[in-house]
Image (cartoon, rainbow, N blue to C red):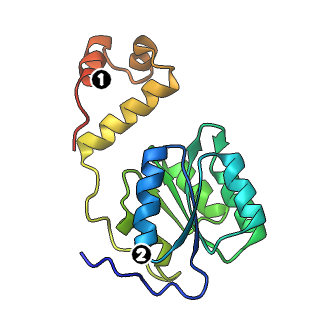
């Protein structure tokens, strides 16, 4: 795969906002190799501070952060730099949040796990064209597993409550949770 820097124009500033520190570091390193000048933030507050002080040309913002909603960072950035290109990332995709992200100014919306190539394609796609489909889309089993994990986390890791909300037998849910994630 060709890793030479892309022609990004004069302003190559990129803000990455994600509370998954390992993912944030990996993505930052990959985006720097592609020619971006990367700044990282691990929270809504830190993302908004950078967006206000030094609004970047590009941004990749996780939807769900420990201290709030990544859409708040998108709104701050849109207010400070309307022409910036923003991609919203999330581990839990839903039509409603995708629509909300685009309505407030996100350029694109990607489900995790998105790699640096997917992110770059989304950031650099022209307004009138769709980015190419991901090289490695999640399998149906992986999407199901991600959904179950998300509901499990939202129920504070309570198996009985999660099973009730998913209309699933508790023992079936326990077996699913005990297995490794599908590819």
Q: Residue at x 28, y 51 (%)?
A: 138
Please state if 161 lies on the left or on the right of 145 as rendered.
right
Q: In this view, does 127 lie above or below 155?
A: below
Q: Which residue is drawn at 48% across and 52% down?
A: 24
Q: Split into 4 quadrants, where in the image is the N terminus?
A: bottom left
Res 92 quadrant in image: top left
Q: Split into 4 quadrants, where in the image is the C terminus?
A: top left
Secondary structure beneath label 1: helix
Secondary structure beneath label 2: loop
Q: In this view, does 169 lie above or below 100?
A: above
Q: In this view, does 50 lie above or below 37?
A: above
State the image coordinates of residue 100 (x, y, percent, origin top left): 62, 55
Please state if 3 lies on the left or on the right of 28 as rendered.
left
Q: Which residue is drawn at 43% across and 62% down?
A: 29
Task: Give the mark nearer the N terminus: 1 vs 2.
Answer: 2
Decide if residue 166 is in sight here.
yes
Q: For residue 34, which numbered disc appears in the image?
A: 2
Q: Residues within 10 Å of mark 1 (few under 14, many from 20)?
A: some
Q: How crowded is mark 2: few (under 14 residues within 10 Å), some or many (20 or more)?
A: many
Q: For residue 177, which numbered disc appears in the image?
A: 1
């Amino acid at each position: 795969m060709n890793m030479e820097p892309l022609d990004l124009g004069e302003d190559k500033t990129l803000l990455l906002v994600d509370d998954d520190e390992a993912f944030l570091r990996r993505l930052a390193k990959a985006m720097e190799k592609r020619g971006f000048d990367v700044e990282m933030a691990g929270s809504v507050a830190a993302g908004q501070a950078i967006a206000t002080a030094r609004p970047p040309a590009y941004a990749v913002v996780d939807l769900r952060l420990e201290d709030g909603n990544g859409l708040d960072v998108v709104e701050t950035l849109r207010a400070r730099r309307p022409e910036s290109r923003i991609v919203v990332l999330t581990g839990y995709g839903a039509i409603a949040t995708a629509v909300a992200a685009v309505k407030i100014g996100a350029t694109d919306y990607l489900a995790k796990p998105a790699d640096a190539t997917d992110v770059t394609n989304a950031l650099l796609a022209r307004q009138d064209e769709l980015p190419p489909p991901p090289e490695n889309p999640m399998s149906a089993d992986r999407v199901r597993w991600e959904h179950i994990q998300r509901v499990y986390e939202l129920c504070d890791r309570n198996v009985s409550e999660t099973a009730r909300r998913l209309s699933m037998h508790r023992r079936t849910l326990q077996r699913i949770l005990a297995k490794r994630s599908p590819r």
